[in-house]
Image (cartoon, rainbow, N blue to C red):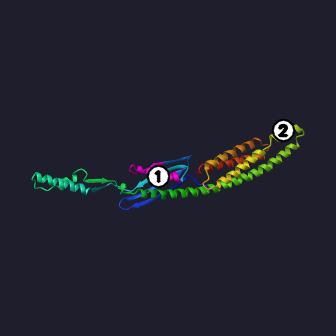
């Protein structure tokens, strides 16, 4: 069965006390696997983990990953109480040495370095939470790629059936056309030369082999679009050879239909993983 390279998946998580975060994955066809990230600068550290998770489950496609945050992902300020008390203790000791009666000013204490700490909320998000969120979005992406892959499989399977039908018609018509032509050739040498030049037995054998091989490969789990595309190239090459040996308009017509179906299959395969 097939997996398409086109799909979309998203996952949303409301992190209590932090805010909502949504992760989106979009994929399109690409010869190899390529990952592109559109993450806020604070979340750039996640790229390596996300890329590893993708490469474990996908082999081809251009994957765009984006992260959306709501407005509550603001930095929050907290007090470093330990440092505050340490400063207070030092100031009290200094007051005693200087024989000052005024207690340490709270405003002064709060303005001292390190007492008021600004901590980004994103740092409170466990790595396991981000991995889970990403895997949920990836699951949905893969599910959609499989769904579209099933549609591609059905379409290509129908075209293979058409190819076999046209091939049978071509073979039948070719034999009839050759038989009719031979009847009009009296010279044995010319007859032998004609039969040799118009023989498409080898081409037909190879086309049938490639069609059988294609069918076997496409029925495998995780069928490779690259491998199937190579087989269609071979089919097209043999069809061209048959067309070059054509001695009849109807035969040429069947060759055109066969080549047309092969081209359509190749177009569809561009989106198979």
Category of crowding for the residue at label 2, using alpha-carbon neighbours closer than 10 angstroms: few (below 14), some (14–19), many (at least 20): few
Q: Which residue appears at 67% of the width and 47% of the height?
A: 232
> Is residue 53 highlighted in magenta?
yes
Q: Which residue is mark 2?
A: 193
Marks 1,2: beta carbons within 8 A: no
Q: Is residue 29 left or right of residue 42?
A: right
Q: Which residue is mark 1?
A: 50
Q: Nearer the viewer, residue 197 or 87?
A: 87
How many numbered discs, if any? 2
Predominant SS of the magenta segment: helix
Category of crowding for the residue at label 1, using alpha-carbon neighbours closer than 10 angstroms: few (below 14), some (14–19), many (at least 20): some
- Give x and y (percent) for residue 256: 72, 46
- Give x and y (percent) for residue 267: 62, 48
Q: Please name which of the two marks, 1 or 2, marks the residue nearer to the observer.
A: 1
Q: Which residues are magenta?
A: 36-56
Mark with earlier residue (1, 2): 1
Q: Which residue appears at 46% of the width and 52% of the height?
A: 50
Q: Nearer the viewer, residue 96 or 188?
A: 96
Q: Which residue appears at 85% of the width and 43% of the height?
A: 181
- Give x and y (percent) for residue 196: 82, 40
Q: Is residue 233 left or right of residue 10?
A: right
Residue lying at the far bottom in this picture: please name it.
Answer: 16
Q: Secondary structure at mark 2?
A: helix
Q: Secondary structure at mark 1?
A: helix
- Measured in 3D between alpha carbons, the distance from the residue under mark 1 to the one under mark 2, in whole angstroms, is 65 Å
Looking at the rendering, in which quadrant would you find the N terminus? Answer: bottom right
> Is residue 48 highlighted in magenta?
yes
- Give x and y (percent) for residue 270: 60, 48
């Amino acid at each position: 069965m097939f997996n398409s390279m086109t799909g979309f998946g998203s996952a949303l998580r409301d992190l209590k006390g932090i805010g909502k975060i949504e992760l989106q994955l979009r994929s399109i066809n690409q010869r190899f696997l390529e990952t592109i990230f559109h993450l806020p600068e604070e979340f750039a550290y996640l790229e390596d983990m996300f890329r590893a998770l993708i490469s474990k489950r996908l082999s081809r496609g251009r994957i765009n990953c984006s992260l959306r945050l709501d407005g509550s992902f603001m930095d929050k300020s907290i007090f470093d109480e330990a440092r505050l008390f340490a400063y207070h203790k030092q100031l009290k000791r200094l007051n005693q040495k200087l024989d000052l009666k005024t207690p340490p000013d709270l405003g002064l204490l709060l303005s001292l370095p390190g007492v008021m700490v600004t901590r980004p909320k994103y740092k409170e998000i466990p790595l396991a939470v981000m991995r889970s969120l990403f895997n949920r979005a990836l699951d949905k992406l893969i599910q959609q790629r499989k769904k579209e892959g099933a549609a591609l499989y059905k379409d290509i399977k129908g075209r293979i059936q058409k190819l076999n039908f046209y091939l049978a018609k071509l073979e039948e018509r070719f034999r009839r056309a050759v038989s009719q032509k031979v009847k009009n050739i009296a010279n044995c040498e010319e007859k032998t030369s004609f039969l040799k030049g118009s023989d498409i037995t080898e081409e037909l054998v190879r086309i049938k082999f490639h069609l059988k091989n294609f069918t076997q490969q496409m029925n495998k789990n995780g069928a490779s679009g690259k491998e199937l595309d190579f087989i269609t190239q071979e089919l097209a090459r043999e069809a061209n050879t048959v067309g070059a040996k054509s001695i009849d308009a109807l035969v040429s017509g069947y060759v055109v239909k066969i080549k047309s179906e092969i081209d359509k299959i190749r177009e569809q395969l561009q989106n198979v993983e």
